[in-house]
Image (cartoon, rainbow, N blue to C red):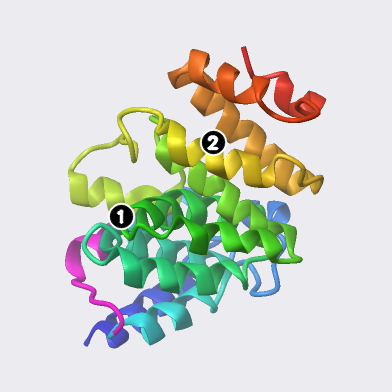
Amino acid sequence: MTAQALQALSQELAQLPTDGGSARQVRCLRGVRGVPTGELTRRIAQAAASLSLSLPADDEALTALFGTAWEDGLAAIGLLATVAPQQPAEALALGLEWAERTDDVATADALGWLVLGPAALLADDLPALLALRGQGRPETRRAAVSAGLAWTPEPFEGPAAAGLRERAGTRTGCMSPSALEGPLAVLCDKFVRDEAPAVRKALRRVLKAWASADPARVTRWAAAVRGGLPKMLSAVVP
């Protein structure tokens, strides 16, 4: 039944009118439908309200949705995010598989922030997340870095977050009420020398969110980095 519902969601997305906005801005191998952001957000929220997912039983159906098109992928991430608090180990395993297939920054950010970050901590498996450092594709590594946003009070955003907002009954929200210094320091240490622009920009955002929540501790971390921070990163550290 769940597989049929996810297939129906994908078919609905395929039939929606397009505005071309996303198609002009996003490039990925799966292709982009061009569904307006507001409509995509609404459909993800509706699916989160009506579906009851369980892992690994629904892994295959969710993965099929993720691989169909860019918008479908965001829907799959948004739905997986709603399961992660109850089944973090299973959600992390599936999210890591998707990360290795990710080739655009928007998907990487949503996957890291909404799924990998929360699930890695809840499953007590930060090493599995950090292992993405060895992946050659920068978007895959960016997903790991964007996981750090889940460990700050940064309000989550984007259509993929619609499922979490629907479940919480709120229009805004964040993954953590405070900056979690331990995992943030480990993550930033791991990726601070990654020179890929996509990765460095994501790390800059994580550091900025950390600095906004806890400037003293991020400054302490930065001071201990051997050789100092690259200029792009040091600009956001107090």
Judging depth in this view, the residue of 73 and 59 nearest the camera is: 59
Question: Relative to 121, is 46 on the left or the right?
Answer: left
Residue 149 on image: x %, y %: 48, 39
Dot 1 crowding, Cα within 10 Å, few <14, some 14–19, many 20+:
some
Residue 11 on image: x %, y %: 42, 79
Q: Quadrant of the C terminus?
A: top right
Q: N-terminal of the two: label 1 or label 2?
A: 1
- Residue 188 lies within the magenta run: no
- Residue matched to label 2: 185
Residue 80 on image: x %, y %: 35, 65
Helix, strand or loop under label 1? helix
Question: Relative to 121, is 216 on the left or the right?
Answer: right
Q: Is residue 39 visible?
A: no
Q: Quadrant of the N terminus?
A: bottom left
- Residue matched to label 1: 122
Image: magenta residue range: 45-56
**Residue occupying the point 57% across, 54% down:** 144
Cβ atoms at labels 1 and 2 below 8 Å apart: no
| Placement of 155 over or under 193, stated as above or below | above
Looking at the picture, which amino acid does disc 1 mark?
Leu
Residue 202 on image: x %, y %: 64, 41
Looking at the picture, which amino acid does disc 2 mark?
Ala
Q: Nearer the viewer, mark 1 or mark 2?
A: 2
Judging depth in this view, the residue of 61 and 119 nearest the camera is: 119
The Cα atoms of the two marked residues, 1 and 2, are separated by 17 Å
| Placement of 126 over or under 235, stated as above or below | below
- Residue 53 lies within the magenta run: yes
